[in-house]
Amino acid sequence: MLTENYETEVQGLYLIGALAGYPLIKHCLNHGYDVIEYIMGNITPRADELPLRALLDGANVEITSAEFTEWVRDSIPYYHSLTELQLRELLLQARLRRVRPQEAIFRTGEPGYSVYSILEGRVRIEIEFKSVELQVGESFGEMALIAGQRRQGAAVSVTAALLLEFDRNTLLRLLRTFPEIRRIFEANIGFGIQDFEPSELPEDFAAPVETIAPHLFISYSHSDQSAAIRLVTALEKERFACWISSRDVFQNYMDEIVLAIKTAVAIIVIFSAMANQSEEIKKEMSLASCYKIPKIPLRIQNVAPEGGFEYEFATSQYIDCFEDWRTAIERLIVD
């Protein structure tokens, strides 16, 4: 068992990266930095604190990230077995959605892109002439995701509610990675995953994920991460699904970047002086051109594109947000 500072039960012995169960290089780098700062006595926010804080602020949840993690684990049976570190990593893939009383969460016949868990309030599920009311801690929307079907019923809030939302790809990864979550999931839906006929089970359930719900791909320099997170928070508040590498890469960075670009409806490029020098963004733009994905440059600094970027954006209309962020985001949403 690790503490929040990655320390083992042996005082002074820390586990990071793959040894702690987090295989990506970004995990190793982030954890290592946090451990060194802690050992040196520099108490700084953890690497995941900024995106988790943005998640909470976007839904007006006024508690700390540690309190939120404990709240989710205590409230929702799916996550009882996860450690704090595992759950914090998982919550980087989540969205928080506030709904008003009698608001439609999804309707019959809609594609099923998300599974929801209730943190506050009550939700009514309506299927044909039947309905059932769900309380805090209960989850819904699983069947449409796992079977790859459209919604067989509707979900409507009974009261004001706060919902924890995960997309289909995150759910499939959870079921593959954590046997206890899979057991609870199968108990909730009333049968095991193995009970599906092969034709009914999505091909990507046991294989690497090959589909992602429609989304906006956010391309940015690491130096502009705070602006990227701010943008994602604003867009997702307006119900635009976003894909951002700091949150949505789970295992294989390169494979998942390529998949996310191929399946994007558009790519928003956060453009700055640092972005102008970024070889990674150039690679992403090249892939976007190969797959004919529209590119939208969002300038956060008054910087002209150079070299390959000048060519890439020759026919693009810039959206400038370095003077008036709110107006620029409103324009982006409308366009």
Image (cartoon, rainbow, N blue to C red):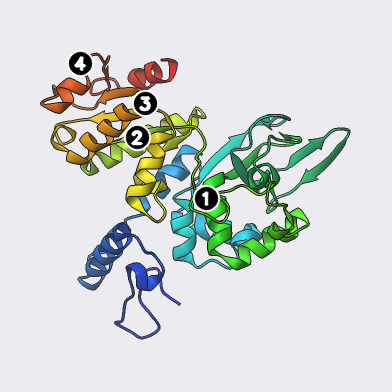
Residue 196 in the figure: left or right of residue 287? right
Q: CA separation, marks 4 and 2?
A: 20 Å
Answer yes or no: is residue 191 visible. Answer: yes
Q: Residue furthest left?
A: 307
Q: Nearer the viewer, mark 2 or mark 3?
A: 3
Q: In this orientation, does residue 45 appear?
A: no
Q: Which residue is mark 1?
A: 170
CA neighbours of label 2 inside 10 A, class few (<14), some (14 to 19), many (20+): many
Amino acid identity at mark 3: Ile
Residue visible at 15% across and 21% down in the picture: 310
Q: Is residue 18 above or below residue 93?
A: below
The quarter of the rendered structure image containing the C terminus is top left
* Chain-order first, disc 4 or disc 2: 2
**In the rendering, which numbered label is found on residue 314?**
4
Q: Which mark is residue 259?
A: none
Disc number for residue 293: 3
Q: Which residue is mark 2?
A: 218
* Depth order, front residue of 120/278: 278
Q: Are marks 2 and 1 in contact (CB under 8 Å)?
A: no
Helix, strand or loop for disc 1: helix
Q: Amino acid at mark 2?
A: Ile
Q: Earlier in the sequence, mark 2 or mark 3?
A: 2
Q: Which of pointers 3 and 1 indicates the residue nearer the eye?
A: 3
Residue drawn at (70%, 32%) of the image: 101
Mark 3 closeness class: few <14, some 14–19, many ≥20 residues within 10 Å: some
Q: CA distance from mark 2 to mark 1?
A: 18 Å
Compared with 1, 49 (above or below) is above
Q: Secondary structure at mark 3?
A: loop
Closer to viewer: mark 4 or mark 2:
4
Gap between marks 1 and 4, in whole Å? 37 Å
**Observer-nearest of 258 and 186:** 258
User: Which residue type does callout 1 highlight?
Assistant: Thr
